[in-house]
């Protein structure tokens, strides 16, 4: 599995639903945001998960009327990927491999910033385990498992 992407959305406090979105080819965060908003069918909240084998993961959250919030476990590796521009990363600028972005991106879903940073850090768990921990805490573990 080179890359795994999943878009989940929900309206209000309702159930998470799997959605289809093409995340390749977006030149910037704004373009990705528009694709996520369209694919989420007007739901108030959408969370895009990107995972590259056991190298890095990213979370991009799009809430109604708010700017997109992005967290990346390894910005240098993600910047070098086809998804770098869509995540707002540039390989000539983002050379750090320490987690960066909005670590509070899923705090209201049960993963505080400190825990997300721990999961994403060198001493954390593997990429798939980190994504699974986020999914379980946020209440969409079964939906994500079905998408894999």
Image (cartoon, grey):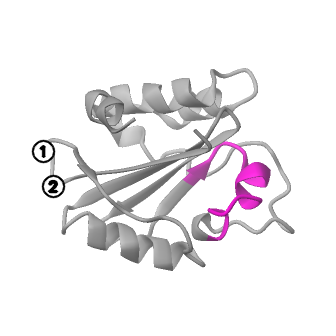
Residue highlighted by disc 1:
14
Query: Is residue 104 or residue 31 the one in the foreground?
Result: 31
Q: Residue furthest front?
A: 1
Seen at 45% across and 66% down, the residue is: 68
Callout 2 secondary element? loop
Seen at 12% across and 44% down, the residue is: 14
Relative height, residue 1 to residue 5 (above, below): above
| Cα–Cα span, label 2 and label 1 | 6 Å
Q: Is residue 64 visible?
A: no
Relative height, residue 52 to residue 142 (above, below): below
How far from the left and from the top, in percent, is residue 98?
77, 42
Mark drawn on residue 71: none
Q: Quadrant of the C terminus?
A: top left
Mark drawn on residue 11: 2
What segment is highlighted magenta in the picture?
71-85
- Residue 10 on the magenta segment: no
Q: Is residue 10 visible?
A: yes
Q: Tag 1: Cα neighbours inside 10 Å, few (<14), some, or many (≥20)?
A: few
């Amino acid at each position: 599995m080179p890359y795994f992407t999943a878009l989940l959305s929900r309206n209000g406090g309702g159930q998470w639903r799997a959605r289809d979105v093409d995340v390749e080819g977006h030149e910037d965060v704004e373009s990705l945001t528009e694709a996520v908003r369209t694919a989420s069918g007007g739901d108030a909240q959408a969370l895009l998960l990107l995972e590259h084998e056991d190298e890095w993961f990213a979370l991009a959250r799009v809430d109604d009327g708010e700017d997109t919030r992005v967290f990346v476990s390894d910005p240098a590796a993600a910047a070098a990927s086809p998804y770098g521009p869509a995540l707002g990363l540039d390989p000539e600028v983002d050379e750090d491999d320490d987690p960066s972005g909005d670590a509070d991106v899923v705090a209201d879903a049960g993963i505080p910033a400190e825990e997300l940073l721990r999961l994403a850090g060198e001493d954390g768990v593997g990429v798939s385990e980190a994504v699974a921990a986020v999914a379980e805490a946020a209440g969409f573990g079964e939906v994500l498992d079905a998408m894999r």
